[in-house]
């Protein structure tokens, strides 16, 4: 696998590497970038705030020593939220009603529209679908109903994405979808219903506390009324990218999305990731003479609403010239790095070698998934690793504060940004010297089938047509 005699443990290039890593310990650039991004009103895909965020990332990359930094626009569908109203209405039978008589209820709850929800006014029976798994959906009648699903997944199963739950519910006849947080704190969650297009039916997020009531009201046979005001129009977004290292035909791509949902600061998702990537870029720029091929550093837009920036970047590059992709989505959030190697054992081994050589732990996840910016490259066979963070022991499964109003800068520790930036740079340095085998479509299909991902990917409309 190695193309050179060096190994991660051979800290040759000697003083240059030591100086670069030493400076990284006191580098405020990642924290300053995170601060500037989280000060913006929002960074929703296609918004003026996202554009301003791109300009901030451009300046940060240039200051980090990245060359030829530019902003490239791409078209997209711009979704904008208006008002949302959600209420439990109509007759219900109370649990202690000895006479069996129906009583009326009319109670409003806070709800937020989910991106790409269409405008709509829906009334129908509330149906609790539990975690929203296909098995649970098969057990209920959703025709004309408002489906209520939890954000989490049963323990011991792979995590089922929101778009899968929504797609299965719509296919079962639901007229609206309610996505209920499993983490308490009066935090309605957000997240796209579809990629870059208006969804079939309205969808909203509600808090865990509201979910508790909705489950009870559904058991009583109550109805829900949902009114969503939203629009989807032609728009544009942008990617920011530049290079470090020698001008070679082959390159390693390091990307991180800088957009965020419009209800929060987007500090964890993915302010930490883009800050980590810029910190890594600064280290790599100091090690240019030590890189065996070009490294492209990219801040991509519109990840949260469809991986649109990554798709645009993937359309621009020659996949055969891309040695590997490093997707920095989730790194910098917590102390320990997590590496998702997406069916590439050599990538997992390389991450092990690098982190072990520098005495740093890494948590592994070998299974592929299609819901982050590596996906446009991975499905084309490019070896792709996602750098994330392992939640503290006992932490909630899932996004935690992510995709809620609680995703704020106070939850970030600067040392995590610095350490993960160093590990990212060290991994990328080795990737420029290493030939990693391509990931075949057959291997990916097999792995998705093993995880029982195929029905969910079809429901979410992300199953590649070339695989049919």
Image (cartoon, rainbow, N blue to C red):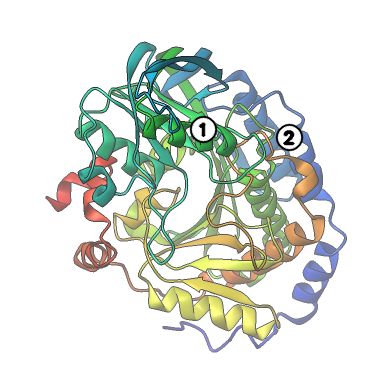
Q: Is residue 366 above or below residue 27?
A: below
Left-right relation of 216 to 377: right
* Dot 1: element: helix
Report x, y in % for residue 399. Answer: 56, 49
Q: Residue furthest left?
A: 468
Going from the N terminus, do you reach mark 2 or mark 1 first? Answer: 2
Return the residue nearer the eye: 189 or 297.
189
As helix, strand or loop, the secondary structure at mark 2 comes to helix
Q: Is residue 33 visible?
A: no
- How far apart are labels 2 and 1 at the CA level? 33 Å
The residue at the far front in this view is 99
As drawn, 66 above or below 386: above
Question: According to the image, label 2 marks what residue?
Answer: 38
Q: Is 194 displayed left or right of 235 in the figure?
A: left
Q: Position of residue 258 (x, y in %)?
A: 60, 39
Q: Residue at x 47, y 50 (%)?
A: 152
Q: Which mark is residue 213?
A: 1
Viewer-nearest residue: 224 or 118: 224
Mark 2 closeness class: few <14, some 14–19, many ≥20 residues within 10 Å: many
Q: Nearer the viewer, residue 408 or 465?
A: 408
Picture quarter containing residue 356? bottom right
Residue lying at 36% horizontally and 11% vertically, measured from the top left: 120
> Is 379 above or below relative to 360?
above
For the question of whether residue 248 can be seen, the reply is yes
> Can you give x and y, in whole percent of width and height, for residue 249 in the image?
43, 59
Residue occupying the point 67% across, 43% down: 271
Q: How many marks?
A: 2
Locate the N terminus by quadrant.
bottom left
Q: Nearer the viewer, mark 2 or mark 1?
A: 1
């Amino acid at each position: 696998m190695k193309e050179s005699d060096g190994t991660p443990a051979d800290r040759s290039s000697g003083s240059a590497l030591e100086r670069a890593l030493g400076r990284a310990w006191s580098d405020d650039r990642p924290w300053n970038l995170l601060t500037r991004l989280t000060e913006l009103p929002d960074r929703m895909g296609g918004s003026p705030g996202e554009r301003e965020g791109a300009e901030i990332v451009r300046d940060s990359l240039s200051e980090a020593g990245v060359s030829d930094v530019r902003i490239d626009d791409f078209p997209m569908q711009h979704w904008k939220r208006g008002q949302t109203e959600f209420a439990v209405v109509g007759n219900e039978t109370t649990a202690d009603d000895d006479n069996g008589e129906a009583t009326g209820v009319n109670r409003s709850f806070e709800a937020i529209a989910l991106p790409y929800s269409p405008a709509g006014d829906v009334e129908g029976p509330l149906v609790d679908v539990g975690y929203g798994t296909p098995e649970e959906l098969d057990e209920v009648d959703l025709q004309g109903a408002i489906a209520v699903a939890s954000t989490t997944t049963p323990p011991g199963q792979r995590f089922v994405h929101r778009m899968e739950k929504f797609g299965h519910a719509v296919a079962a006849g639901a007229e609206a979808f309610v996505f209920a947080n499993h983490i308490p704190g009066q935090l309605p969650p957000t997240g796209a219903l579809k990629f870059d297009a208006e969804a079939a039916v309205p969808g909203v997020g509600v808090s865990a506390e509201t979910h508790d009531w909705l489950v009870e009201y559904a058991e009583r046979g109550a109805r829900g009324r949902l009114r969503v005001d939203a629009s989807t129009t032609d728009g544009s977004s942008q990617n920011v990218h530049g290079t470090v290292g020698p001008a070679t035909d082959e390159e390693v791509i390091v990307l991180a999305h800088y957009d965020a949902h419009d209800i929060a600061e987007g500090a964890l998702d993915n302010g930490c990731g883009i800050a980590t990537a810029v910190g890594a870029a600064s280290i790599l720029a100091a090690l240019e003479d030590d890189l065996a091929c070009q490294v492209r550093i990219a801040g991509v837009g519109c990840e949260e609403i469809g991986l649109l920036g990554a798709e645009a970047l993937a359309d621009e590059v020659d996949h055969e010239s891309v040695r590997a992709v490093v997707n920095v989505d989730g790194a910098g959030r917590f102390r320990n790095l997590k590496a998702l190697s997406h069916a590439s054992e050599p990538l997992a081994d390389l991450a092990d070698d690098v982190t072990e050589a520098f005495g740093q732990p890494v948590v592994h996840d070998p299974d592929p998934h299609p819901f982050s910016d590596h996906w446009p490259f991975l499905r084309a066979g490019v070896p792709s690793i996602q750098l994330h963070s392992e939640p503290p022991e006992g932490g909630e499964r899932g996004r935690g504060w992510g995709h809620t109003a609680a995703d704020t800068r106070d939850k970030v520790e600067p040392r995590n940004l610095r350490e993960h930036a160093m590990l990212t740079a060290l991994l990328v340095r080795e990737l420029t010297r290493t030939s990693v085998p391509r990931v075949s479509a057959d291997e990916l299909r097999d792995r998705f089938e093993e995880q029982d991902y195929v029905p969910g990917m079809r429901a979410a409309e992300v199953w590649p047509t070339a695989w049919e």
